[in-house]
Image: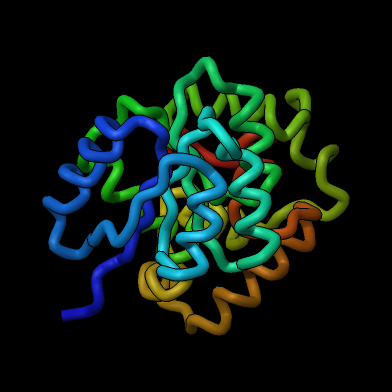
Amino acid sequence: MPEPIRILLVDDQRLMRDGLRTLLELEPDLAVVGEASNGQEAVQIFAELQPNVVLMDIRMPVMNGVEATARLCQDWPGANIIILTTFDDDEYIFEGLRAGAKGYLLKDVSGAELATAVRAVAHGSALLGSAVAQRVLAQFVGLSPVKPADALSDPLSDRELEILQLIAEGLSNPEIAARLFLAEGTVKNYVSTILQKTNTRDRTQAVLKAQALGLLGDRA
């Protein structure tokens, strides 16, 4: 059996952490290895435990989730962080994504959706939510509805759009390669080209920009 995905829970409410732990540990491939009640603790514990995924609350004492996300992504560029928030936290969501979070979830997410999101982010995928999330992401990118051809200096090819859609759905490079009958190295090359054409730094940002430009379907 492969090693379980190791998760760090960061939330100032003990009841929320207990609930998340209960949901996550129903899945045999997920393991909660640590908890923190604020961002400062999260930074310290992350260095000790090196978890695969961090579930990060936003509003916390001492150090909030945005500051902690920025610190972690600066010190550990490979950190996989999911912001956990409510819809009222729009401004914090935008800041968290800019700080380097791989995505976000609303706190009323189901156990199955939570587990799926953790797996997707652990494997390097971007994380997008519901139609509400899409509106928020469009606002985050700061782009008004425009034609893709006008927004990108070099439009994405049909194959690049297909791969970007699969990234938005949570597929990793190996999974995309298997789905499209391509070599994994070929998929990596396509992803690099997508980042260049969208002028983004990583897969998450590429999906966010494409979502705001209307390049992706409703499945993202």
Q: Quadrant of residue 122?
A: bottom left
Figure disc tally: 0
Residue at x 30% of width, y 50% of height: 116
The picture places residue 145, in percent across and down from the top left corner, at: 73, 24
**Front in this rendered view, residue 174 or 60:** 60
Q: Is residue 193 above or below residue 37?
A: below
Q: Say which residue appears at 82% left-offset and 46% top-offset.
A: 152
On the image, the x and y values in percent for residue 12 come to 41, 33
Q: Is residue 159 above or below residue 144?
A: below
Instruction: Decide if residue 46 is on the left or right side of residue 66.
Output: left
Residue 205 visible, this orientation = no
At horizontal 22% and vertical 46% (from top left) the residue drawn is 21
Instruction: Return the residue nearer the eye: 129 or 1.
Output: 1
Specify whether 41 is left or right of 192. left
Quick check: 81 above or below 46?
Answer: above
Residue 36 rendering spot, x and y as whole percentages: 41, 47
Give me the residue at 85% from left, 38% from top.
150
Of all residues shown, which one is farthest toward the top? 88
Residue 34 visible to the viewer: yes
Query: Most extreme residue toward the front, as rendered?
Result: 62
Lateral position of residue 15 relative to residue 161, left or right? left
The colouring scheme, among rainbow, by chain, secondary structure or one colour, is rainbow
Front-lying residue, 107 or 70: 70
Q: Nearer the viewer, residue 187 or 131?
A: 131
Image quadrant where one finds the N terminus: bottom left
**Residue 59, image x, y percentages:** 53, 28
